Amino acid sequence: MNIKRILQTAAVAGFCTLLTNANAQVSTDSLILHLPMNGDATDISGNGNNGTPLNVVPAEDRFGTANGAYSFNGSSGTIEIPASPTINKIQAVDEITIAAWVKRNNVSADVFAILERYNPALDASYILELNTYLGGIVFVGNPAAPSPLITCNYTNWNVNQWYHVAFSYSKTAGQAKFYVDGTSVCSIPYTIDIDIADSTASFWVGRSLTGPDEYSNGLIDDLKVYYRALSDAEIITSVETGKQLKNRLAVYPNPARESVSLDHLPAGANVILTDLAGKEVNRSVANSEVLNISTKELDNGFYFIRVESLGSSASRKLIIRK
């Protein structure tokens, strides 16, 4: 009896079960913005809500992949996302989930803005940010409403450490929830409309324009916005699926010559191959756990493989050597 093979099979089966459950729990039908920040601010949700990077620098993401995140300098770095009919759905349904991976360079800085929609006529916004001065994670739904600001008193941050930060809110449910690394850290009664009275206003990543113009100092990656409130289970699944992809994804041979294989893939995963400049050279969909990609037409050099599944992703470096 091959005990090692049995254990490997059991591990893969457990991974597939997790992904099957995740598929049942995390629907992307309400995903209106997803910026993986792989060297640009392209929205891969299918809604075309692409951003414009301003004074931000590509950096290593939480997996150590070059150009997999953006570094914000704390003084002028931001990403602007124009208004659109799809992103305006947030205000129409009064439900929202915002999630991103963040790494702070300075935890004592007052503001680390994740996402803000700003109305210059009112000098007001709705926003999700980490705010040291106010004592934790802050959300404002409608600055014109009575008591629009809610604060989750969470201050357990370390410098240069990645955290998954998420916020979900449903006016119908009357509840706002804050999450760190998949764990619900605050649940607060809240029934405010999501509105800033300007459907043409841009969204800003890494910048808070209300009052003094303040910028985030650190890294932001994998920003997602849904126009519904994700459940606790969906938030946990989103975080854990990304960890499973990172830990189990296998790429071989590497270096590769005429083809490369990927193993332990979730069915339906998107597999994107890019060169060092970020140019896409191949895109495939995994129909089984193993996917073979021809590299015959590719030049020698370094490439990146990125796997995206159920709102999570993992990356690997690939060398082509013929």
Image (cartoon, rainbow, N blue to C red):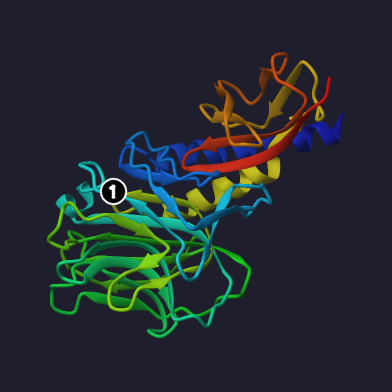
* Residue 305 spot, x, y in % from top left: 65, 34
Tell how many labels: 1
In the picture, residue 285 is in which quadrant? top right
Image: 20 above or below 199: above
Above or below, 121 against 240 in this view is below
Query: Residue 317 falls in which quadrant of the image?
Result: top right
Please report the residue visible at 17 percent of the width from the left and 68 percent of the height from the top: 192
Q: Secondary structure at mark 1?
A: loop
**Residue 95, percent across and down?**
24, 55
Residue 139: tell me if it is visible.
yes
In the rendered image, residue 259, in percent from the top left (x then y), is placed at 74, 18
Badge 1 is on which residue? 82
Query: Picture quarter containing residue 189?
Result: bottom left
Instruction: Name the quarter where the N terminus is drawn.
Output: top right
Q: Is residue 190 left or right of residue 304?
A: left
Q: Residue furthest right?
A: 1
Name the residue type under label 1.
Answer: Pro
Crowd band around label 1 with a 10 angstrom C-alpha radius: few (<14), some (14–19), many (20+) = some
For this rendering, which residue is in front, 2 or 300?
Answer: 300
Q: Give residue 145's position: percent from left, percent from top.
A: 13, 73
The answer to whether residue 285 of the structure is visible from this angle is no
Q: Residue at 69% x, 45% y: name it.
A: 247
Q: Is residue 295 positioned above or below 138 on the image?
A: above
Q: Residue at x 63, y 69 (%)?
A: 160
Q: 175 or 117, which is in the foreground?
A: 117
Q: Is residue 276 left or right of residue 268?
A: right
Q: Quadrant of the C terminus?
A: top right
Q: Is residue 258 left or right of residue 139?
A: right
**Residue at 59%, 36% in the rendered image:** 278
